[in-house]
Amino acid sequence: MRKLFLILFLVSGSIFLAQNDSIVIPNNSILKSLNVGDSITYYQCHVEEAVQQLSTASGQTLTGKPQRYTITEKFVVKKNADNYSVNYYASSLTVFPNRKFSALKIREKPYWEFKKERAFVLSDKDLKYLIALEKKGKEAIEYDYAITKYNTNQLIIKTKKDFKQLVIDGNYILSKLLGK
């Protein structure tokens, strides 16, 4: 009888531990400072190569040559009692809003025309991506503010008046990583 009780106890304990395997947010992460009800905004500015297509009134489609465009995306992450919810916004493909990535440090402008694309709840995997990008990014310096061929992906993390501006090496785009 004792053996059966011991086996049941060990099995139920391992099931409890497996269910309690939630992500641990490091102390140096900006996410750690959030309380329930607080939000944090992630702006990601990146450069994409795209081909512009125009349709005329007569139905003719004209295609331009490939060009590089700046795109700014905004993720508003809100901490709830048991999860993190996200509202995802994107701006149009234009010269603005991010002719210079440093403009995002000051404040959001109405002409950036962010449009809400979707809302979703962050999974543990999504949280790991946010933490990893925060670790991977290096602090931007004045040289990094202008868009050049060497500087095409930045992440600005903003809480109230505090922010981090990080240069991200590689093609790590939040909209392609989160909510999948």
Image: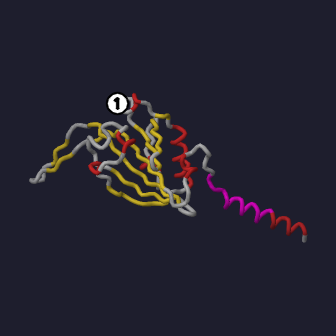
Against 160, residue 151 (above or below) is: above
> Where is residue 36 drawn, in percent x and y?
55, 60
Residue at the image point whose x is 56% and y is 48% from the top: 128
Compared across the picture, whether 34 is left or right of 113 comes to: right
- In which quadrant of the rendered view does residue 15 lie? bottom right
Name the quadrant containing residue 44. top left
Q: Which residues are magenta?
A: 10-23
Q: Which residue is mark 1?
A: 148
- Give the image quarter of residue 47: top left
Image vertical order of residue 140 relative to residue 82, above or below = above
Which corner quadrant holds the N terminus?
A: bottom right
Q: Is residue 21 magenta?
A: yes
Q: Residue at x 48, y 59 (%)?
A: 85
Residue at the (52%, 52%) spot, across then down: 126
Q: Residue placed at 28% from the left, 45% from the top?
A: 93
The extreme front residue here reads 161
Q: Is residue 1 visible from the viewing direction of this image?
A: yes
Name the kind of residue labelled 1 in the image. Thr
Q: Is residue 67 covered in magenta? A: no
In the displayed structure image, the side of residue 12 where residue 37 appears, left or right = left
- The image position of residue 156, as x and y in percent, is 43, 43
Q: Please state which of residues 172 and 133 is positioned toward the viewer in this rendering.
A: 133
Which residue is more in the foreground, 6 or 158?
A: 158
